[in-house]
Image (cartoon, grey):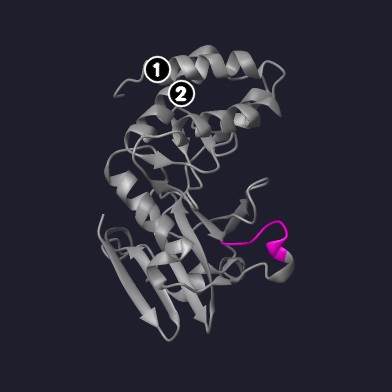
Amino acid sequence: MRLATFQTRKTCILYDAERLCDAKHYPRIQVAHFTPDFWRNQQRVLGTAPGRGSSVFINPSNLSSDPAWVLRPYLRGGMAAKISRQRYLWTGLERTRAFCEMRLLAKLYQQGLPVPRPVGACVTRAKLTWSGALITVCIPQARTLADLVLAHGADSTLLEQVGSVIRRFHEAGLDHVDLNARNLLIDAENKVWLIDLDRCRLRRPGRWQSANLARLGRSLARFDNASDSAMADIQLGYRNVSSS
């Protein structure tokens, strides 16, 4: 993966040059690609991601064999959204959540960890604020761990694998500040993926690791009356991590 930047006026894009420049069937990167309306006008919106903000699945390629992309604008929640839903305080380009998440995803992806391949991050500055969006490659035929738990489709083997994957991320130093059952995806091959790395960072080992697991346990309790049993399986996989 080779990251490059493209700037026009007050907008800067950080993107995977290997994917967007070396593959002729993908469009040349432009600011409009980071707006859902562009893809709607092109009739290339495949759907949305319920429960995960305003993420939009799009078809970017002329080849049906190529995977879809996921476009996720950065939007505020809670009380801050009453002030501005889309704008964040400007503290420097490399400190924007979009660029930080793009670079973190690229680093973890290059290490072989199961995260979506990042495509590009877009940041537009307006005086003292910025707005932006992130595009990643879609993980095909994936379901959230929450959905599987609700459907009683998460057995002990899968839950142990979830724990093993979390341990691998922790060993790489990733503090996932929103580790919950909707940010863990399971694909058709039962491979576990971690998504939504907004505000996450790399850290030395510490109490944050147990805090991550505790947050996941609280998340599972919302979907499963047997969450203690599920967490026991996850903890077992976490302790018995493998390199697979």
Front in this rendered view, residue 115 or 153 = 115
Seen at 49% across and 76% down, the residue is 124
The image position of residue 241, as x and y in percent, is: 35, 20
- Label 1: which residue? 239
Label 2 residue SS: helix
Q: CA distance from mark 1 to mark 2?
A: 8 Å
Q: Is residue 221 magenta?
A: no
Is residue 152 positioned above or below 57 on the image? above
Q: Magenta region, mostly helix, strand or loop?
A: loop
What amino acid type is highlighted by mark number 1? Arg
Marks 1/2 in contact by CB < 8 Å: the verdict is: yes
Label 1 residue SS: helix
Which quadrant of the view contains residue 183? top right
The image position of residue 85, as x and y in percent, is: 67, 67
Seen at 56% across and 19% down, the residue is 231
Examine the rendering and report whether any part of residue 59 can be seen: yes
Which quadrant of the view contains residue 61? bottom left
- Label 2: which residue? 163
Which quadrant of the view contains residue 203? top left
Q: Name the quadrant of the N terminus.
A: bottom left
What amino acid type is highlighted by mark number 2? Gly
Query: The magenta stretch spans which residues?
Result: 74-81
The image position of residue 20, as x and y in percent, is: 33, 63
- Label 1 crowd (10 A; few <14 / some 14-19 / many >=20): few
Q: Nearer the viewer, mark 1 or mark 2?
A: 1
Q: Is residue 80 magenta?
A: yes
Is residue 42 positioned above or below 197 on the image? below
Is residue 27 positioned above or below 105 on the image? below
- Label 2 crowd (10 A; few <14 / some 14-19 / many >=20): many
The image position of residue 134, as x and y in percent, is: 48, 60
Seen at 38% across and 37% down, the residue is 114
Is 88 displayed left or right of 114 in the figure? Answer: right
